[in-house]
Image (tube, grey):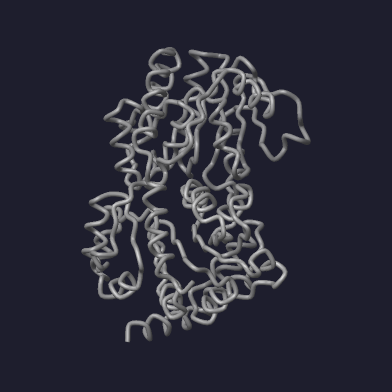
Amino acid sequence: MIDFIYNLLLWLLLPLLVPYHAYRSLSRGRRTAFMERFGAIPEAELEPLKGKRTILVHAVSVGETLAAQPLLKGIRSRFPEHRVVITNVTETGRGVALKSNSADLCIYFPFDYPFAVRAVLKKVSPDLVVIMETEIWPNFIKEAGRLGIPVLLANGRISDRSLSRYLRFSWFFRPVLQRLSALCMQSAEDASRIQAIGARPETVHVAGNLKYDIPLRPKNPEQASGIKAKYGIPGGAFVFTAASTHEGEEVFVLEAYRMLLSARPESFLVLAPRHPERAAGVAEQVKKSGFSFRRRSQLEAEPAPQQPGEVFILDTVGELAGLYGASDLVFVGGSLVPTGGHNPLEPAACGIPVLFGPHMENFREIAATFLAKEAGIQLVGAAELGEKLVSLSGDAAGRDRMGRNGAGILAESAGSTTRHLDAMAACLGGSRG
């Protein structure tokens, strides 16, 4: 009965889904990819999979795709006989997947209609499906079970904000969770929560957080100089990077940057909005604030070196991690506004100290670890950003200590990839192949 009601609602929503999806795609300058989303994958694209065993990894957007990178590398090493397919929901996630070169095929995840998911699963014919971070699609998971394909939930987490909702609708989620072959959760608390919602205890594992398994990339002067030269950043500048900012945050970042320039005129701001399609609006905000700026997408057309006191707007996907190597201090966005924050581990992998705001609900455990290990500073509010920025800019020893502490967190917390791969091996051992 639950499946019937769910599918009835899907069909009733179809007349709204198609125009809504078309509007979102076209308004952001992206292709709609309706054929793929309804299960029609061209045969030519499937050619690399012909006659090969396959593992399908679903990562909804940028964050999940980045988190999956250690696992994807592990799959290549542990299961070399398998081809890898990545599915994404967002264009930005797909862009990161394509740039990473970590898959043999990148396609869009199908809409959760039985005919669409059945078509994709039959064409790709995976021996195992890996779903990143609690993406629960009932028809996709059910159809995989019908075809004898095990499904593993990777890097699973249940946030404080979503727990009550999951529990309220546990009657809906329980049968879906019980169809999963394995659930690799980030922490013991996440494991307890997923079982309370309805997962079978014997399928639940505490595997740690894949996001900790980022290769350490210690910053060095030669590398930093090369990155600055590539992007036209002034060679002797103190580089402040505001990463993954959301609407409402840039105004505070720019005010803090103004304070920084008063203390260190040779400073330079890299401003990276979380959603590149916001770049035009961000550029307008920068202009209104009185700063000269350059957008990354204009760099080839305007190759002249940038100057201290200017703003470099990163409006492309997949380059932020590289720019951390030229940064001296990073603010992690999505944390001054109530969106749950973003991952501070990428800059930590380069030994860069981080600042983040009070809203880190989606990374509560990581944020708490950073504070306990003195690898980052949590701001009480937006007004504190400029003060901390100026203070740390004049404390090279303090920045170095925070950076080393952050890198130490990654070194101490590694191992999640191996635990995930072990769970995958167990699933593949019992799969149809």
Q: Quadrant of residue 422?
A: bottom left
Q: In the rendering, at what x and y percent does residue 22 appear?
A: 61, 68
Above or below residue 196? Residue 12 is below
Residue 137 vertical placement versus 224 (above, below):
below
Residue lying furthest right in this view?
A: 301
In the displayed structure, 22 sits above or below 425; it is below
Task: Name which residue lies at 47% across and 29% down.
Answer: 330
Going 49% across and 49% down the picture, which residue do you hit?
Answer: 74
Would residue 22 be found to the left or right of residue 9 on screen? right
Residue 328 in picture, x, y percent from top left? 50, 22
Residue 34 placed where, x, y %?
A: 62, 71
Q: Nearer the viewer, residue 47 or 95?
A: 47
Indicate the quadrant containing the N terminus: top left, top right, bottom left or bottom right.
bottom left
Front residue of 17 and 116:
116
Who's the residue at 56% across and 55% down the image? 80
Q: Is residue 233 left or right of residue 186?
A: right
Q: Residue at x 32, y 69 (%)?
A: 177
Residue 239, image x, y percentages: 55, 23
In front of the other: 126 or 43 = 126
Please indicate whether residue 323 sits to the left or right of residue 354 in the image: right
How many marks on residues?
0
